[in-house]
Amino acid sequence: MPLVDHDPVSFEASLSVNVVGTYLCMRSEIAAMRVRGRGAIVNISLGAGLQGVASLSAYCAAKHAVMGRTEAALDYAAANIRMNVVARLDCSGTYCPRAPQSHRAFCATPAPWAPEEVCVAVFR
């Protein structure tokens, strides 16, 4: 839905689930990993976290924030805590038609990945 038509309650809900939820998870995970002396966190985003998508302003903002928060957590590398973000991109360009060719080069298939395929890539 266009930005001007998006009500503030649903916009805030999208941010709460994606941004605040990720923050709360990372906060607890990092605390446990610091005690353990190591760990790995993999956050999930989407192509919408790489570029804006028409009519998905709240979702794009939230997914950009997840990617930025993950990248900003580099200060835990010294504690042997690794952080990455997976951003599944529709390689066909139907979902993200402006996806740069450089992003498409990382796609193994010309069609969107099924959720099971994303899981295999993350836990490989």
Image (spheres, grey):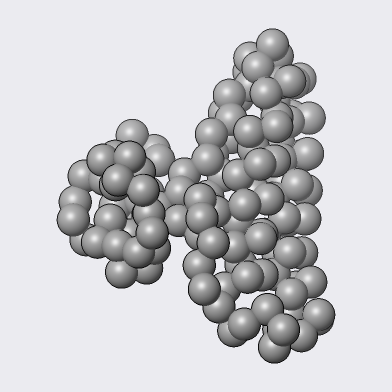
One can see residue 17 in this view? yes
x and y percentages locating residue 122 in the rendered image: 40, 40
Q: Quadrant of residue 34?
A: top right
- Locate residue 40 relative to residue 13 in the image: left or right: left
Residue lying furthest top in this view? 78
Kindly indicate the quadrant of the structure image that contains residue 8: bottom right
Q: Say whether residue 114 is visible.
A: no
The residue positioned 63% from the left and 21% from the top of the image is: 81
Q: Residue at x 70, y 29 (%)?
A: 73
For the point 51% across and 55% down, the residue is: 51
| Residue situated in front as seen by the camera: 77 or 50 | 50
Count up the numbered dots: 0
Which residue sits at x=73%, y=64%? 15
Image position of 69 with respect to 57: above or below: above
The C terminus - image quarter: top left
Quadrant of the drawing holding the N terminus: bottom right
Q: Tell me where residue 31 appears, x and y as whole percent.
A: 78, 30
Q: Position of residue 38 (x, y in %)?
A: 63, 18
- In the image, farthest residue toward the left: 110
| Position in image of residue 40 (x %, y %) | 57, 28
Location of residue 95 with respect to 70 vertically, above or below: below
Asked whether 66 or 39 is in front, the reply is 66
